[in-house]
Image (cartoon, rainbow, N blue to C red):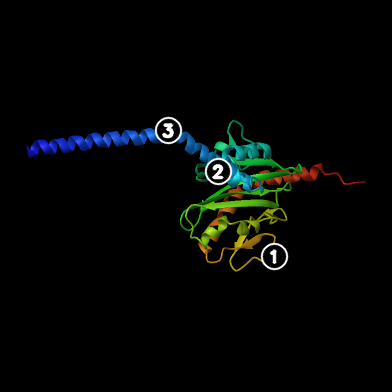
Amino acid sequence: MNKRSNIYIFVYSGVMVIVVAALLALASTALKPFQQRNIETEKRLDILKSIGMAQEAATAPSKHSYVGDQYTKYIVEQLVINSKGELINGIEAFRIDLKVEMAKPITERNLPLFVAQLDNSTKKFIIPLLGRGLWGPIWGYISLSEDYNTIYGASFAHKGETPGLGAEISTVVFQEQFKNKMIFNNGNFVSVKVVKGGAGENNPYGVDAVSGGTITSVGLEEMIKDCLEGYQSFFVKNMKKETESYEPES
């Protein structure tokens, strides 16, 4: 009797495991389109934040619709370039997995670049960022003005940095520091320094580090430098075009 009872328990447990696994797989499949939609909406929102748009996303009746409309309105072009500053055709910028690209040598990367046009008709160039903080990945977007040098805005996020310390990189106060900073100094790429103890208001290439978040600050500085580095040739080429197209008044 005990032997039969044990067999029954094993069979019942096995059937239940299979049923539960099947239900979980079904639920995962059914939810996947919704999860993907959420991921894409958050990505569009982060891109828009770097140019100061989509500020009403949290209160919009439909976040997806609002962000989608704002994205369509302001993002007028999506490019993919290589480290030589050449355009690459046949690849959709929005679908590029930056983690995969950053693992490649810089000469082999497909680099996404988003072009925004604001209400005043000025263009901004948005570059995605990916790096590592103290406890996990950090990421974001940084936008440049039409001179390909001056930072117009920045948006950063993190997975698990310490609240009140490294997590401060995701606050507006920290991100506002990047506005009007520059990434080139007399034609040389210098990126932006995140300075422990304070960069000083008159430093055009530095911002204040997060107090008590040294490792996160260093990670953020390295992220910006590593990601922007691949775009150097594209920026320099376009700077030269702007200079050559300028005709001084007679």
Local crowd size for mark 3, using a 10 Å CA cut-off: few (<14), some (14–19), many (≥20): few
| Tag 2 residue | 42
Residue type at the position of mark 1: Glu
Mark 2 or mark 1: which comes first in sequence?
2
Q: Is residue 194 above or below residue 27?
A: below
Report the front residue among 48 and 5: 5
Give me the C-alpha separation between circle 2 and circle 1.
32 Å
Report the front residue among 124 and 223: 124
Which x, y percent locates residue 199? Answer: 64, 65
Residue type at the position of mark 2: Glu
Which x, y percent locates residue 168? Answer: 55, 59
What residue do we see at 20% from left, 35% from top?
12
Q: Quadrant of the N terminus?
A: top left
Residue furthest out toward the left: 1
Number of marks = 3
Q: Is residue 119 above or below residue 208?
A: above
Look at the numbered disc 3 and give the secondary structure of its residue. Answer: helix
Mark 1 or mark 3: which comes first in sequence?
3
- Figure quadrant of residue 68: top right
Q: Which mark is residue 201?
A: 1
What residue do we see at 63% from left, 61% from top?
207
Mark 2 or mark 3: which comes first in sequence?
3
Left or right for 141, reference 121: left
Whether residue 86 can be seen here = no
Which x, y percent locates residue 52? Answer: 66, 49
Which x, y percent locates residue 169? Answer: 56, 57
Local crowd size for mark 2, using a 10 Å CA cut-off: few (<14), some (14–19), many (≥20): some
Callouts 1 and 3 close, C-beta under 8 Å: no
| Tag 3 residue | 30
Left or right for 16, reference 106: left
Residue type at the position of mark 3: Ala
